[in-house]
Structure formats: C-alpha cells, structure tokens
Image (tube, helix red, strand yellow):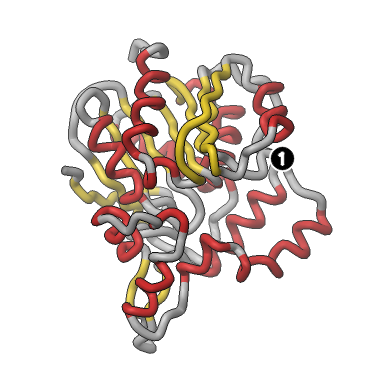
Amino acid sequence: MAIRKTVFLNRINLSYLDWETDGEPILLLHGLADHALGWSAVADQLAQTYQPIAVDMRGHGQSDKPDGGYDFDTVVNDLVQLMDHLGWAKAHIVGHSWSGKVATYWATRQPERFLSMVLVDPIFVYGMPGIFRLTFPLFYGTLPFLKGMGPFETWDDAIDQGKRMKQYRAWNDLQAAVFRESLEEKRDGKIGSKFTLEARDGIFDAVLRVPGLIGDIQVPSLFMQPEAGVNRFDWQLKPYRKYLKNLATETIPGNHWAFLVEPDAFYQSLSKFLAVHPQSL
C-alpha cells in the first residue's frame, strides 16, 4: 500500500504516493486533470521490484494549485526538486499524455536525470500554430476527459458522468476511487474538480506553445501506444522516431488510460522494457 506524503518545494506543497520499497526508482507522472492514484494498480506491481513514486502534479490532486507556474520549466523544476528530496540522482520517468510531452522537454535539457523514459500515449509533441492556440480554448468544453470536472449538483450526478467516461469504463473499485479523488465539494455546495481552471489554461498554453522535442535524445525510451489511444497512425510517431535515438515502440491493449483500464497488460509491457534497460545507480 502506498503512503501519501507531502513536501514543500519550489514554493508549493507537492503531494505524492510512496510505496516505500527498494529498487531502481520510477517516477510516475499523470496526464491532464488526472492524479497520482490512477497509477496505483500498476505501481502496486512495480513495487515488487522497483521503487515507484506517483506525484500529484502542481494544480492537480492534493498538491497546491497556484494561479501560475504551469510552464514546462517550472513543472520540471518541481520534479527535479522532488527527486533531490528523495535522494534520486536519476530515475525511470514514465509520462502519460501531457506529462509525456513534459518528459521529452525535460530529457532534452537534463538527460542525466533519466535512467529511461516511457511515453504513454503522449500529446502535441510539437508546438502548435498561433491560430490554433487562439481557437483551442473553444473546444475545452467538448473534450470528453474534461467533462468529469463538473460542476455537478450532487455526488450522484458526478458519479453518473464518471461511469460514462472511457477511463472509468469498468467502474471497478479503483476506477471509482480515482474518479472520486479527483473531485471535492465546493463552497457553493456543488461538486467540482480539484484540477483548477488556472492550471488547465496554463498547461494548455504550454503544451500548445512549446515544442517537446528539439534535438536528439539518447535516453533509452519506450513509446506505449494503446490500441484505442490518440496515437493511432504512423505519422504521429515520426517525431519520436526522428529524435529519440534509442526508441522502442509497443502497442498495448486499452485506451488513452491503459494503465487504469488494462493495468496487468500495461505492467507486463512496462516491466519487460525496464528489465532490458537496467542501469547502475
């Protein structure tokens, strides 16, 4: 069982789950509007061999939610300071969706902090044209994974929405717990996301404005491509194949949240990659 811990660094309280095990360190980074608990099923298995930590990124979960600081440099600094706090000189970095792009940005600048890099269905690795950045906020309300933010009049209304979302399609105990953990009762009595609008807007701005890959990266890397994910076409993998010089790709069962909907298959693929890329610490 993971232990919830919080540390004050980079001027915010950063919350994370620590399985308190030994082995090579693995830092698990969630996607937009998600949080650390979503990694639990996979991390429980990783903890048999490795030392996993799953962090609530700033603006998410139980971590602080400042009005700003969602640019990639600040977010990466959060993670570097967390690793220093943990005594980790380097780690296996696993990034999902938005944080997959954060990982590529980080690896371009500080490859020495990586034992390996795992990208789970990452998004928008290149910067987007200015006109797209201006119009993209119009689509916020139509993005299915943001519909779980609410607000909802009651918890029953929230749960009804959660059961219709792809990442909670089985509505098992863990998926239900992950959905509930993403929400809280607001001052007006309504139920809404812990993920803030300031964080949403700041992260989208950084994701659309800043390219994640701008140079060759030698870090051993795995691109995990869910069968029903957002990266379904060969052209989408071209920038990763161009810049990641030690890249493996693997198609895995499930959708964009494969680690939550197909955790056993996800763990098998991830552990197979890690086993052939052991590193001396």
- Indicate the quadrant containing the N terminus: top left, top right, bottom left or bottom right: top left
Q: Does residue 177 sit above or below 113 in this rendering?
A: below
Q: Amino acid at mark 1?
A: Tyr
In the displayed structure image, the side of residue 281 where residue 138 appears, left or right: right
Depth check: 102 or 83 in front? 102
* Residue 11 visible within the image: yes
Depth check: 88 or 210 in front? 210
* Residue 8 visible within the image: no
Depth check: 189 or 10 in front? 189
Instruction: Tell how many labels.
Output: 1
- In percent of width and height, residue 180 lies at 31, 65
Q: Residue furthest left?
A: 1
Q: Which residue is mark 1?
A: 126
Residue occupying the point 51% across, 54% down: 32
- In percent of width and height, residue 77 lies at 48, 42
Residue occupying the point 46% across, 42% down: 254
Q: Does residue 248 sit above or below 159 in this rendering?
A: above
Residue occupying the point 58% across, 45% down: 72
Q: Quadrant of residue 93?
A: top left
- In percent of width and height, residue 267 lies at 34, 31
